[in-house]
Amino acid sequence: MATVRGCNLPDDLFYNVDNNVWARREADGTLTIGMTAYACSLAGEIVSYTPKKVGKEIEQNKSVCTVESGKWVGPVKAPVTGEILATNPDVAGKPGTINADPYGSGWLVKMKPSNWDADSGALITGGAVAGAFETKMGADGFGGC
């Protein structure tokens, strides 16, 4: 796992660095999607989670849900185009779970990608993750998680 400025960034995930989201490709080809630890740190404690409806087709870089903290309200954008298969009931009941465990129980939606092979080319994974986030955090003047 990479750690950049105190933010954990697991190497086995796929990241849309610009939108601060991650995707985990499951064995059945579906994706689990969430916010990065960096995004959680920027937002502060999440107090509200409003997902799009199950069955909705979401285009790449369009909102899969809206989250709200004391200092920010905004969309969490899909790293790929696909259909929402599930939303996280635990996060709906306790939105702070997103901050506490962004790569585990704080996941936001599960999706069936429409064209993984085409869309995943824009995502970063493995050894390139740390460098990409270090550049982004430096440009943002981010002190650390």
Image: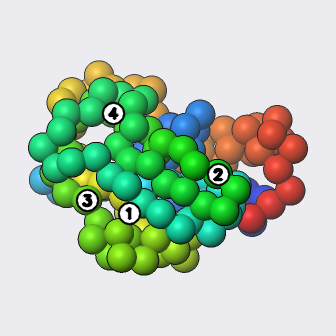
The residue that mark 4 highlights is: 80
Crowd around label 3: few <14 · some 14–19 · many ≥20 (10 Å): many
Q: CA distance from mark 3 to mark 1?
A: 8 Å
Q: Is the C-beta separation of discs 3 and 1 under 8 Å?
A: no
Q: CA distance from mark 4 to mark 1?
A: 16 Å
Q: Nearer the viewer, residue 101 or 67?
A: 67
Crowd around label 1: few <14 · some 14–19 · many ≥20 (10 Å): many
Q: Earlier in the sequence, mark 3 or mark 1?
A: 3
Task: Classify residue 19 as left or right of residue 82.
Answer: right
Instruction: Name the residue located 74 percent from the left edge and 64 percent from the top edge.
Output: 145
Instruction: Name the residue located 54 percent from the left edge and 57 percent from the top edge.
Output: 68
Crowd around label 4: few <14 · some 14–19 · many ≥20 (10 Å): many
Q: Secondary structure at mark 1?
A: loop
Closer to the eye: label 3 or 1: 3
What kind of residue is marked 1?
Answer: Trp
Disc number placed over residue 72 in the picture, else none: 2
Image quadrant in which you'd find residue 1: bottom right
What kind of residue is marked 3?
Answer: Thr
Crowd around label 2: few <14 · some 14–19 · many ≥20 (10 Å): few
- Report x, y in % for residue 117: 26, 27
Q: Secondary structure at mark 3?
A: strand
Q: Earlier in the sequence, mark 3 or mark 2?
A: 2
Q: Nearer the viewer, residue 92 or 29?
A: 92
Image quadrant in which you'd find residue 128: top right
Closer to the eye: label 3 or 4: 3
